[in-house]
Image (tube, rainbow, N blue to C red):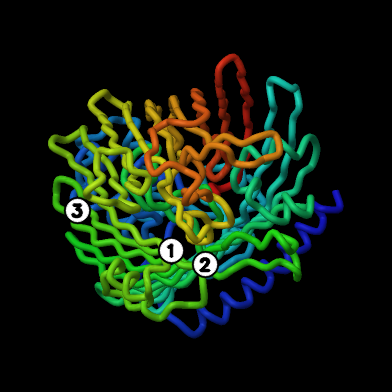
Amino acid sequence: MKKIFLIIITLTLTLTLTLTIITFLLINFTLLAQVENVPVSNPVYNFLLRAETKGLLPHYSLSILPWQKHTVISALKLIRENDSLLSENEKNILNNFEREFEIVTVNRAVMFYSEMDTVQVFSKKMFSDYEKAFYHYADSNKNVTVHPLASLDIIDDINSNNSLLMGTLGIRLFGTLTNNFGYYLQVTNTAMLKGDSVLALLDNKYAHNIKFTKYNSDADIAESHVAYQNKWFYASLGRETKLNGSGLLQRIYVNDLSPAFDAITVAAKFKTFEYVFSHNSLLGLPSPDHNQVGVDAVIPNKYLVMHNYIFKPKWGEISIFESVTYSRDFEFAYIVPLSFIKSLEHARHDRDRANIGLNGTFRPINNFQIKGTWYLDDIKFSEIGKNYWSNKTAWNIAVITSMIKNIDLGLEYSRVEPYTFTHFNQQNAATNDSILFSSYILPNSDRWSIFFQYWWGQRYPIKLNISYTRHGNNIYDEEGNLIFNAGGDPLQTTRWGLDSDRVDFLGGDLVKFINAEFTVGYEFIRNFSIHFSYNLKAEKDIFSNYYRLILRFSDF
């Protein structure tokens, strides 16, 4: 209870300070556009994927997320223009998102009154379809919203009969000022209320939280950004979860397993073309000779620079990307937004890990599309097809169809060659705080995935994902010494003189496992929802399974 009390006090002080700042901003600035980003946790992106598959979103691309709020709004408006192609269930879902993004007139209840909103949330409106917020103000010149965030999360390990209860409180502030300037802040604090804390590690956001894992304390997580847009020019600075790569259940390039990236982004955005540059600050590997946390921790500087050239014809997308990972002091050569990274990397004495790749979405007919990514880490052309260790690539291809009423079906294959994402400088591996960020599967692996979801009229579809994964592990002796390098660890490259320069795909200690996940959510009162998920992993004769039940206010 003491933890919950401290969380409430902290959030109350944060809210008071936030509202003070808001009041000052609203007095001094005006707003006309929605420049801030919509977080990747919002279920609107899943609905937009279905609309994309149906052919309702020409010249849009879902390979890079998050989108700006005005982009989401324009996409929803375009779907509404073609609502004759929607089922009644889809129309109900579209109605829901139109209210959330204020495309239509919205009834709202708030804790702190404004000139626009004077209905008290602590009334019978709490249990109505009114939108609910701490504070909201919007007119033709100004717009700001402060949302509470809260959840109770039960995780139960069916095998061990262990369970866990966690509680989260938080706040989200967002808006746009002066027609060009957007801002976003989300802060949450999660406390373990009862049970086995090991179960919390099933969720990446807790498993990778230093305060929770190292200090056995609550998990505090914050994401924020400020953004500026003027016609075609866009720039942002902030810390937020990003996704980059085309596919269904696989993101090759940037996924959401690792902690959020801290980045500066510059972009040129047009209807059929975008160019996006970002310089991201990551966490390198802590020195083994020092503590991993605290004032004695020694963690090298590490950066990821990315360029995306995105072409968006009516029938899909073609995106060419390049990136470089380096681990030293800030490198001015890589900050130039328009450049060719591989040449720069060579000019800087070939010390860094540069790569290139291609995203694609092809929609030959409505209700059917093909998505995929090809990622080139390194290659020696004379050794192609000869199992050479340094020919490092990753790719995935997926098909998805929405031909059956209210149902999406998809099939995806992903493959990552041995040693992909590794580098001779271990700090330059494709990891952030030791966690692989460029793929959901490890090097020397492949995966088949089946994707199913049924849109039953709720913002949360009924979903079932089943995957079959094969992975070749490196082999170690009882003392932990590496005795056979199969190229299966992103932090372990080849060892000259010790490892063969030929490598077999899926060599080493081969493991095979099946994962199945079933999820369903129901918003029983606007902003209040309940979510259930069941997860099963089967490896040989070993079965592990757990279920999760979340009662949530707002999506986060």
Residue of label 1: 325
In this view, which residue lies farthest toward the bottom? 28
**What's the distance in space between the residues labelled 1 and 2, CA to CA?**
7 Å
| Disc 2 residue type (three-letter) | Lys
Q: Which residue is mark 3?
A: 59
Nearest to N terminus: mark 3 or mark 1: 3
Q: Amino acid at mark 3?
A: His
What SS does tag 2 mark?
strand
What's the residue at 48%, 52% (across, down)?
107
**Is disc 3 in contact with disc 1, using a CB cutoff of under 8 Å?**
no
Question: Does residue 470 appear in the picture of this structure?
Answer: yes
Q: With 231 as the anchor, is 418 left or right in this view?
A: right
Residue 247 lies, with reference to residue 515, above or below; the image says: below
Residue 527 x/y as whole percent: 55, 45
Q: What mark, if any, has residue 496 been given in the picture?
A: none
Callout 3: SS? loop
The image quarter containing residue 113 is bottom right
Residue linked to disc 2: 302
Q: Separation of disc 3 and disc 1 at Cα?
A: 30 Å
Q: Is residue 349 left or right of residue 554?
A: left
**What is the crowding at mark 1: few (fewer than 14 residues within 10 Å), some, or many (at least 20)?**
many
Residues at marks 3 and 2, CA–CA distance in whole angstroms: 35 Å
